[in-house]
Amino acid sequence: MFVTVLGSGGSEGVPVPYCNCKVCKSGDKRYRTSYLIETKERRILVEISPDFRKQQLNHNFSIDYLFISHEHYDHIGGLPDLRNIMLVAKIKIKPIKLLISKRLHKKLLHQPYIVREGIRYFYNTLVRHKKLLPMIMDYGKKYAFSDFQIQLFRNRHGRISCDGFLLESEGKSLVYLGDAGSLYQKTESLINDSCPDLLIANTPYFYSNKKITKGSRSTAKRLWITHHLGIDTISHLCAKKILLSHFSHRSGLTHKEIENLVSEYKNVIAAKDGMKIRV
């Protein structure tokens, strides 16, 4: 099993237009976060970011399954491009099976209908035309697909829920936490009991909330950035390798600086666009 990092940036990507901060001027380039998991027989796209079109053109990958963790734009913003590819350009590619919780499926189907060409429109159109085939999944139940098994779990991401999964294939295991800001006890137990070969965590600020919120930030900003985990809150979890990703320019850390920080942990890797990891 292999994982390709298609994008390792936070919701704003790196560099950010008009920004003159150290990170944006460092030469680092990060598309919005997305991963391609390859088992022996199948390819699973994890998150469909607003940079999906560029990521596909750069890596030329096919998709058998798509997983979406939650409804924030940086995780679903590629749906318009997918609709344009399949229904406007009429490119003949096979329908994609969507690995999704019942909760999130309903949320995307019934998002506020603000404009005609919003995410609700694109999602409904893809489902209605059977280009996306929702595989509705319950939390805590194992599902078998082709040559892999997958089990969904749910955690908190600020005020909303964020889904993650444990995936097993040919004796290897992978956990994806998504944008979890806190882990339920069930999730911690699942991770520590399975001790996956690879754990992927989205940590925009590298550290957890307590470290990043020190200083003169406003209360509103402190509340906003409590939505994500950090290295100090996940390094205790059992995993052979931990991949940190989804880095924001607001961390104030260049990729080189992040690599220096992770060197203190024997099993932690800092994600970079285009990186390919054997699980």
Image: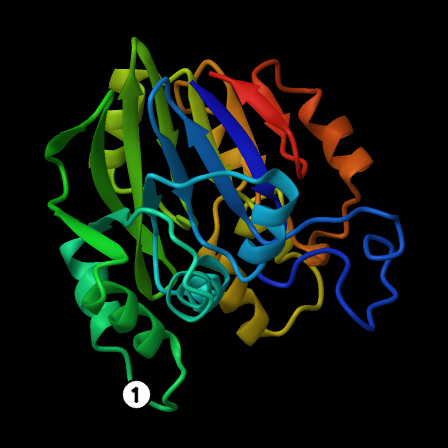
From this view, report whether residue 156 is shown above or below residue 50. above
Q: Quadrant of residue 104?
A: bottom left
Q: Nearer the viewer, residue 152 or 239?
A: 152
From this view, report whether residue 23 is shown above or below residue 41. below
On the picture, is 9 further left or further right than 177? right
- Label 1, residues with CA under 10 Å away: few <14, some 14-19, many ≥20: few
On the picture, is 194 further left or further right than 248? left
Q: Nearer the viewer, residue 75 or 231?
A: 75
* Number of marks in the rendered image: 1
Colour scheme of the picture: rainbow
Could you tell me if residue 205 is visible in this image?
A: no
Q: Position of residue 197 (x, y in %)?
A: 41, 15
Amino acid type at image mark 1: Tyr
Q: Residue at x 39, y 41 (%)?
A: 63
Could you tell me if residue 71 is visible in this image?
A: yes
Q: Residue at x 19, y 53 (%)?
A: 134
Q: Nearer the viewer, residue 48 or 30?
A: 48
The kind of secondary structure element at disc 1 is loop
Q: Residue at x 66, y 56 (%)?
A: 214
> Quadrant of the image for the N terminus?
top left
Q: Residue at x 34, y 52 (%)?
A: 68
Pointer 1: what residue? 113
Q: Position of residue 19 (x, y in %)?
A: 82, 68
Q: Position of residue 49 (x, y in %)?
A: 51, 57
